[in-house]
Image: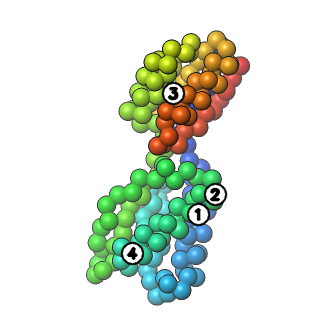
Amino acid sequence: MPTFDIVSEVDKQEIRNAIDQVNKEVSTRFDFKGSDARVEQVDYQLTVFADDEFKLEQVLDILRIKLTKRNVDVRCLDTGQIEKVSGNKVKQVVTVKTGLDSELAKKVVRSIKDSKLKVQASIQGEVVRVSGAKKDVLQETMQMVKKLIDDFPLQFQNFRD
C-alpha cells in the first residue's frame, strides 16, 4: 500500500551557516560599526542581540535573507518579545519551529478526511502518515495539503509504492 509522511523539518547545519554569514556581514557593515549586534544559536533557539530596536530589526532582516538564500523557509521562525538587557541594549529570542505540533497535525488529518479522498491519515508523533490504494490519490492529497496549509512549511517524505 503506497504511503508518504507529512513532516516539518529544518536543516540545522544550514541555520548555522546562515548565522555565521549574518554575524560576518554585521561585523563588516558600516552602520553596525562599534555595535554589539550578533546572533547566537543553541539548538533551534536563536538569540539576536543589538544596541536598539531599529538595529535589531535590521539584523532580523539580514537573518531572514540569509536563511532564504540557504533554502530554509522563514515561516518556521517564531519571534519572541523584545527584552531590554543592560542600558539601551536589547535582545530577542527567535525559535525555529520543527515538527508538526498536535493542533496542526489534527488540522491536516481533519482536512484530509473531509476531502473525501480515498486515503487514511494518522498522527505518529510529529509526523502525519498518509496511506492509500493508488499513488495518484496520494499525489492529489499532497496538492490539497499544500493549498490548505500555507502559513507553515511542510515537506513530504518517504513516498513508497
Of pointers 4 and 2, the one earlier in the residue sequence? 4
Q: Are the residues at dot 4 and dot 1 in contact (C-beta closer than 8 Å)?
A: no
Circle 1 SS class? helix
Quadrant location, the C terminus: top right
Q: Which mark is residue 128?
A: 3
- Say which quarter of the image contains residue 47: bottom left
Measure the alpha-carbon separation of dots 3 and 2. 26 Å
The amino acid pointed to by label 4 is Phe
Closest to the camera, between mark 4 and mark 1, is: 4
Q: Is residue 5 left or right of residue 56?
A: right
Residue assigned mark 4: 54
Measure the alpha-carbon separation of dots 1 and 2. 6 Å
Q: Is residue 161 left or right of residue 153?
A: right
Q: State the image coordinates of residue 92 (x, y, percent, origin top left).
A: 37, 65
Q: Which mark is residue 66?
A: 1
Q: Residues within 10 Å of mark 4 (few under 14, many from 20)?
A: few
Of pointers 3 and 1, the one earlier in the residue sequence? 1
In the depicted view, which residue is nearer to us: 81 or 86?
81
Q: Are the residues at dot 1 and dot 2 in contact (C-beta closer than 8 Å)?
A: yes
